[in-house]
Image: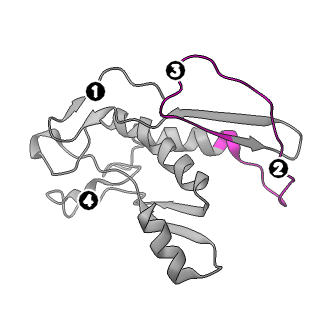
Amino acid sequence: HVWLQAAQSLNGAKPDVTTETGYWDGPPEKRLPFAVYPDTIIARYEPRLFLEQFKVGIVRTYQYELLDDPTHLDSLYAHGGLLNTSVQPKPQYYALQNLISLLKDPGSDSAPASLDYSLEGETDHLERLLFSKRDGSMYLAFWIEKPSYDLRTRQEIGRAHV
């Protein structure tokens, strides 16, 4: 939250927005630094990223970027798209599309709802957000804020839950 605090010190009362965020993949044979393979791991991380952004008060988050850049394939930044260079959706595209589809509620803001619930068992690293829609329906999002990929070894860590 250090970056958020720094932005708020500059923004004053203006809403916080993230203009470029996301994860990079790329061809595994290139071994690009900070790249995550396979992109099914990114599909797990991407919705959590957007939920975390919203949870800390960021009102709008923009994915970097829509389309992989075919002109700089040796650059990490060429592999941050939701679509590959053939304009085919990656797994993270579908993950975000599903999240947006589920939670969209166009129109004026509605009063936030509350929900009484309890959890049992292991809840370390368990994050949650309650969303309410104008029609009275509610969605309670749960995710485990814990890595499921090791950047150093480029290996999946155990079996992570989405």
Look at mark 4 in the image and give the residue it sits on: 78
Mark 4 belongs to which amino acid? Ala
Q: Which mark is residue 112?
A: 2
| Foreground tag (2 vs 3) | 3
Q: Earlier in the sequence, mark 1 or mark 4?
A: 4
- Judged from the image, the secondary structure of the residue bearing numbered disc 3 is loop
Disc 2 to disc 3, C-alpha distance: 28 Å
Disc 4 to disc 3, C-alpha distance: 39 Å
| Foreground tag (3 vs 1) | 3
Q: Which mark is residue 157?
A: 1
Residue range of the region highlighted in magenta in the rendering = 101-129
Kindly give the residue lying farthest to the top in the view shown: 121
Q: Is residue 25 left or right of residue 92?
A: left
Q: Are marks 1 and 2 in contact (CB under 8 Å)?
A: no
Look at mark 3 in the image and give the residue it sits on: 122
Q: Earlier in the sequence, mark 2 or mark 3?
A: 2
Mark 2 belongs to which amino acid? Pro
- Judged from the image, the secondary structure of the residue bearing numbered disc 2 is loop
